[in-house]
Image (cartoon, rainbow, N blue to C red):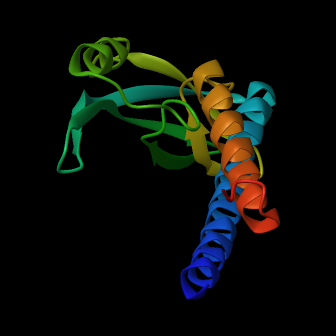
Amino acid sequence: MHSHSANLISDHAAGWIFLGAGCLVLWLGLRQIWRGHRSRTWPQAAGTVVSSGVRMNADGKSNSYSPAVSYRYAVNGAEYRGEVIRSLMLTGNRAWAEARAARYPEGSAVPVFYQPSQPSVAVLEHGADAAVVAMVLMIGTMFPYVGWSLLTGRMHS
C-alpha cells in the first residue's frame, strides 16, 4: 500500500511539472509567434550586414548550428545593431545554417524590420516559421495534456 501511495505522489508531482512546463512553453512560444506575426506590419529601415557566419550550439550530446548574422541600421537618426534573423528560429545542421547565413553576406545592404515602439527590436525576416509554430503548438498542448492526465489519474495503471 505504501508503494501505491508513493506512486500517486510522484504522479501528482510529475503532473504539475508537465502541466507547468507545457503552459510555459506554450506561453513563451505563442508570445514569440505573435511577435513574428506582428513584425509583418513593422516599418522597414535600410541596414548593412556587419558579420555573417555560423554558430555551433553544443549541448554535450550533439551539436546543432544556427546562422550568426549581425547588422546595423538607423531609425530617426539613432544607430542600432541587431542579430535576430527571424523571431523564434530553429537550429539545424551545419549545411542548413551556412545556407541561411549565405543569404546575408558581410557588407550587403538588407531591409531591417523594426518594432515602432521599440526600434532596438528588429528582424531581417518578418513573420513566423511554420515549423516553429507547429512545434510550439505540439509541445505546448502535449505536455499539459500529459500533466492533466497524471493529475486526474488517467495515466495511472
**Is 4 placed left or right of 68 in the picture?**
right
User: Furthest-front residue in view?
Assistant: 1
Q: Please tell me which residue lies in front, 72 or 98.
A: 98
Residue 115 percent location from the top left of the image: 71, 43
The residue located at (56%, 38%) in the rendering is 88
Q: Is residue 107 visible?
A: no
Residue 130 location, quadrant: top right
The residue located at (69%, 25%) in the rendering is 127
In the rendered view, tell whether residue 99 sits above or below residue 78.
Answer: above
Residue 81 location, quadrant: top left
Residue 20 location, quadrant: bottom right
Residue 66 percent location from the top left of the image: 32, 31
In the rendered view, tell whether residue 3 sits above or below residue 120.
Answer: below
**Is 10 placed left or right of 50 in the picture?**
right
User: Furthest-bottom residue in view?
Assistant: 2
Q: Is residue 26 visible?
A: yes
Q: Please tell me which residue lies in front, 75 or 134.
A: 134
Residue 52 percent location from the top left of the image: 27, 27
Q: How many marks?
A: 0
